[in-house]
Image: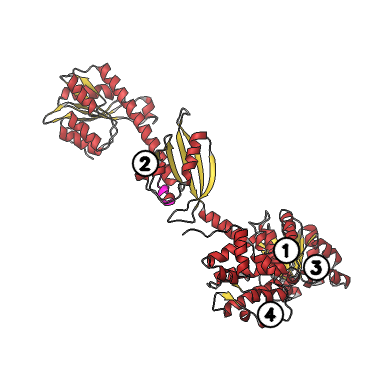
């Protein structure tokens, strides 16, 4: 902006440090209707390296104040029809931090008191001595520097508070809220301006206030602790947060209160649950003692690099075991590549596994990356390994021995880091005896064998699996089928299941398509199961459904109608009453 004629601007000789850019020149405004005062002040202060602006009246002073960032104002107490107090009030109204020093020709206690009370930094009495002027100016600018530093600190703190995605709440040792950032509103549902100064326990909200006791503990122990809790917030009932509660101390390490950091980890928990539900060993459904031994073996194998051979009839869950081994291992973040070896001819399988270069054979119009390269750092699962041709067996044996292979049509060896898991439903020992499978490859693959039992050998798992698939198809097909009748479960228990768990899954899906009620009945089953003549005792069914959690689940689904719950579970009403008493099950209050 242009400076009016009645405002004089002068910059004195800059000290060498200013010329080198080490300091920012301080701007001082002198307001006085006496030209001699303005000139004298300007002369003295300019020589100290300050930039001086002068104004002779109230109006010109306001023009400078409105357009300049000032560090100090020296204002005469009398300015025609206005006063220096008016200047002071304008400065405070604008929110400026610069100190204001009053200049008075007739000082008295009342004038000085009024000026200080209204926010003046200090006052000067005319005539003003040079030493006094420089001393009070220096003190005022030091005060301004402290205010600026405090503002910068506060601004930085505010920026940090706004940038952090986690909710941050600080409380004093009386549990009154000192500060809260904007994330508190998103995570906790509190509006920061509304809770500052309030007792934390009285803060309005719709959660369980679990963090209140945590804060009390921090105030008592003065130790940092971390917790994972469910908020049970009215608007976010499934929200899970990670709480970190720490002592709040000042610069002198004096205890002031506590700081609570709340991180919303709901999405992370959901992903963990999804991952666990898809890959952890419990997803391989089964309570049979043979399955329990397999779970223990899988836990031991997960953290090793050992080659594993999974054997078992078709449909017993060999691929699910391979996935569990991969996702429970240190390779879980790397690829799991699956190859069905029986689905491709010999020449195509070689190219599929190891890749080829352009021109390696008719139709090889470009380079192809094989499955072993795709799986680098991870796991390759070779399903139906018993079907591969002798030439492929040789290449696979070389890879297992040397961890390298060659592209089809190339002689340059390629090294990759891949764990091999193989599976077969064939008797490889018999194939070795007949010369169809290399003995050395067989023992290379069978470092550890995981043998999965057929479903007919673990019939006590059938009800468990059947209810698992019921829940799965309820979600997949958007249905609400409560259970499977006892007669249907008896048919399941008596059937031989040549297709094993896969056939059971298909049978449940078939029943879901036909079922229009809320219970799967015998008529809904595939004909080969429905008409199977072999029927077994329903005892294993009773063993499963009398578990407390299944009984409670059935009771909750039927609104605690004991007769209906008993029908869903395939047990008598007398049995369900006995089990309610035995397991001390109680109906929840509304």
Which residue lies under the disc numbered 1? 288
- Mark 2 and mark 3: span between their CA atoms? 73 Å
User: Which is in the foreground here, disc 2 or disc 1?
Assistant: 1
User: Going by the image, does 286 lie left or right of 554?
Assistant: right
Do labels 4 and 3 touch, CB within 8 Å? no
578 in relation to 526, above or below? above
Q: CA distance from mark 2 to mark 4?
A: 68 Å
Q: Earlier in the sequence, mark 2 or mark 4?
A: 2
- Give the CA distance from mark 4 to mark 1: 22 Å
Instruction: List x then y, in percent, for residue 50.
Output: 30, 27
Question: Disc 1 on helix, strand or loop?
Answer: loop
Q: Which mark is residue 529?
A: 4
**Residue in front for this viewpoint, 229 or 13:** 229
Which residue bears the numbered disc 2?
196
Q: Earlier in the sequence, mark 2 or mark 1?
A: 2
The residue singled out by tag 3 in the image is 393
How far apart are labels 3 and 1 at the CA level? 35 Å
Counting every numbered tag in the picture gives: 4
Mark 4 vs mark 3: in front: 4
Q: Main secondary structure of the magenta part?
A: helix
Crowd band around label 1 with a 10 angstrom C-alpha radius: few (<14), some (14–19), many (20+): some
């Amino acid at each position: 902006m242009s400076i009016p004629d009645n405002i004089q601007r002068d910059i004195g000789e800059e000290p060498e440090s200013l010329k080198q850019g080490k300091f920012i020149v301080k701007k001082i405004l002198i307001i006085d209707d006496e030209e001699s005062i303005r000139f004298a002040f300007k002369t003295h202060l300019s020589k100290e390296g300050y930039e001086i602006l002068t104004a002779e009246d109230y109006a010109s002073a306001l023009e400078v104040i409105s357009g300049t960032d000032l560090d100090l104002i020296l204002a005469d107490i009398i300015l025609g029809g206005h006063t220096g107090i008016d200047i002071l009030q304008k400065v405070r109204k604008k929110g400026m931090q610069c100190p204001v020093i009053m200049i008075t020709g007739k000082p008295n206690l009342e004038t000085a008191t009024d000026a200080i009370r209204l926010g003046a930094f200090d006052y000067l009495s005319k005539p003003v001595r040079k030493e006094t002027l420089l001393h009070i100016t220096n003190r005022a600018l030091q005060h301004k520097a402290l205010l600026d530093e405090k503002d910068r600190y506060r601004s930085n703190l505010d920026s940090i508070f706004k940038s952090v995605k986690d909710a941050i709440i600080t409380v004093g040792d009386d549990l009154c809220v000192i500060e809260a950032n904007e994330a508190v509103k998103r995570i906790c549902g509190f509006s920061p301006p509304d809770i500052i100064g309030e007792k934390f326990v009285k803060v309005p909200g719709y959660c369980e206030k679990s963090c209140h006791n945590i804060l009390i503990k921090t105030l008592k122990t003065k130790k940092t602790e971390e917790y994972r809790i469910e908020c049970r917030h009215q608007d976010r009932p499934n929200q899970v947060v990670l709480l970190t509660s720490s002592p709040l101390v000042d610069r002198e390490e004096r205890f002031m209160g506590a700081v609570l950091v709340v991180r919303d980890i709901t999405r992370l928990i959901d992903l963990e649950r999804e991952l666990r539900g898809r890959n952890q060993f419990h997803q391989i459904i089964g309570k049979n003692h043979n399955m329990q031994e397999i779970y223990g073996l899988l836990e031991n194998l997960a953290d090793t690099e050992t080659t594993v051979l999974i054997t078992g009839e078709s449909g017993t869950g060999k691929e699910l075991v391979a996935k569990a081994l991969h996702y429970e291992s240190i390779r879980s973040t790397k690829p799991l590549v699956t190859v069905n070896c029986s689905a491709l001819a010999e020449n195509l399988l070689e190219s599929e596994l190891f890749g080829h270069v352009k021109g390696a054979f008719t139709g090889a119009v470009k380079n192809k990356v094989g499955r072993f390269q795709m799986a680098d750092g991870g796991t390759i699962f070779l399903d139906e390994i018993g079907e591969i041709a002798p030439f492929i067996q040789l290449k696979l044996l070389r890879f297992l021995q040397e961890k390298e292979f060659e592209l089809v049509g190339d002689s340059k060896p390629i090294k990759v880091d891949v764990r091999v898991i193989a599976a077969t439903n064939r008797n490889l020992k018999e194939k070795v005896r007949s010369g169809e499978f290399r003995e050395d490859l067989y023992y290379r693959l069978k470092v550890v064998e995981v043998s999965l039992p057929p479903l007919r050998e673990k019939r006590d798992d059938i009800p468990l699996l059947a209810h698992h698939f019921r829940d799965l198809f309820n979600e997949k097909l958007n249905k609400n089928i409560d259970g499977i009748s006892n007669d249907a479960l008896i048919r399941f228990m008596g059937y031989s299941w040549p297709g094993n768990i896969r056939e059971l899954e298909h049978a449940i899906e078939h029943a879901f398509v036909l079922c229009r009620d809320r219970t799967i009945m015998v008529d809904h089953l595939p004909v080969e199961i429905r008409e199977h003549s072999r029927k077994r005792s329903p005892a294993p069914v009773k063993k499963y459904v009398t578990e407390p959690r299944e009984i409670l689940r059935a009771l909750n689904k039927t609104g605690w109608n004991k007769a209906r719950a008993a029908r869903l579970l395939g047990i008598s009403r007398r049995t369900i009453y006995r089990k309610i008493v035995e397991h001390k099950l109680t109906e929840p209050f509304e």
